[in-house]
Image (tube, rainbow, N blue to C red):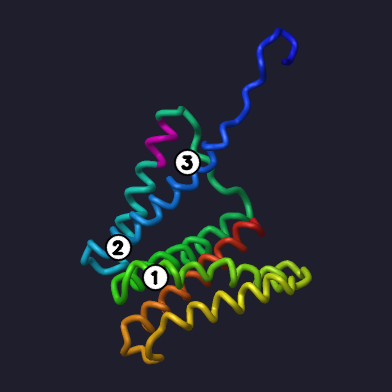
Amino acid sequence: PPQGGMPSAMPSPSRPLLALHTAVLLFGIAGLFGKWVTADPIVIVFARTAVATLAFLLILRVRREPVALPMGKDWAWLPLTGIVLALHWVAFFWAIQVSTVAVALLAYATAPVFAALLEPLAFRERFSLGALAAGAITLAGIALIVPRWSLADATAEGVAWGVLSGVTFAVLSLLNRAL
């Protein structure tokens, strides 16, 4: 034990697992919410953003933390990141509405593939053969869920919108890394 005789507090192994399950639950609820609400995806995204902003400001106020605004050149990036995030959410909710929550989530799960493909280009890094192989396998798996390659098919349209959601999320992740 450390000085004083009290054992140090060990992090509970269940805490990260609980956080992971909570994140999955919240993400899944967002998908179900998008299926249950019949409003246009743009309206859903606007309402979701408004509620999240108010909740965030309330949390900051309760914790008595200041609102930190970007400084200098970061202001120029703010509209771009906002547009990319909005495109991500609109594409995600559109994928859900035209197909199923499962199709949209599976297609959106391509985000890490696109991040792995775009990151070396954006940051002048080497491509990872493992990441490229995993990306090829992931995209092949997504292709397998499409019964008919026609945008008239709900699954194909859902995959297209879901992959767009994944691409825009990957771009947002890279923008956040750059900033």
Distance between the Cα atoms at labels 2 and 3?
24 Å
Relative height, residue 63 to residue 28 (above, below):
above
> Disc 2 or disc 3, which is closer to the eye?
3
The relative height of residue 26 versus residue 178 in the rendered view (above or below) is above
Amino acid type, callout 3: Leu
* Residue 94 percent across, percent down from the top left: 34, 72
| Residue type for callout 2 | Gly
Q: Which residue is located at x 31 percent, y 82 percent?
A: 154
Residue 104, numbered label: 1
Q: Is residue 46 above or below residue 57?
A: below
Residue type of the residue flagged with mark 1: Ala
For residue 65, which numbered disc appears in the image? none
Residue at 37% from the left image edge and 36% from the top image edge: 58
Which quarter of the picture shows residue 107? bottom left
Residue 171 within the magenta-colored segment of the rendering: no
**19 up-or-down from 45: above or below:** above
The residue that disc 3 covers is 18
Dot 1: what SS? helix
Q: Which residues are magenta?
A: 56-61
Crowd band around label 2 with a 10 angstrom C-alpha radius: few (<14), some (14–19), many (20+): many
Q: Earlier in the sequence, mark 1 or mark 2?
A: 2
x and y percentages locating residue 116 in the rendered image? 65, 69
- Tell me which numbered mark, 3 or 1, is placed earlier along the sequence: 3
Give the residue at mark 2: 34
Kindly state the secondary structure of the residue where label 2 is placed.
helix
Residue mark closest to the camera, 3 vs 1: 3
**Residue drawn 52% across the image and 36% down it:** 15
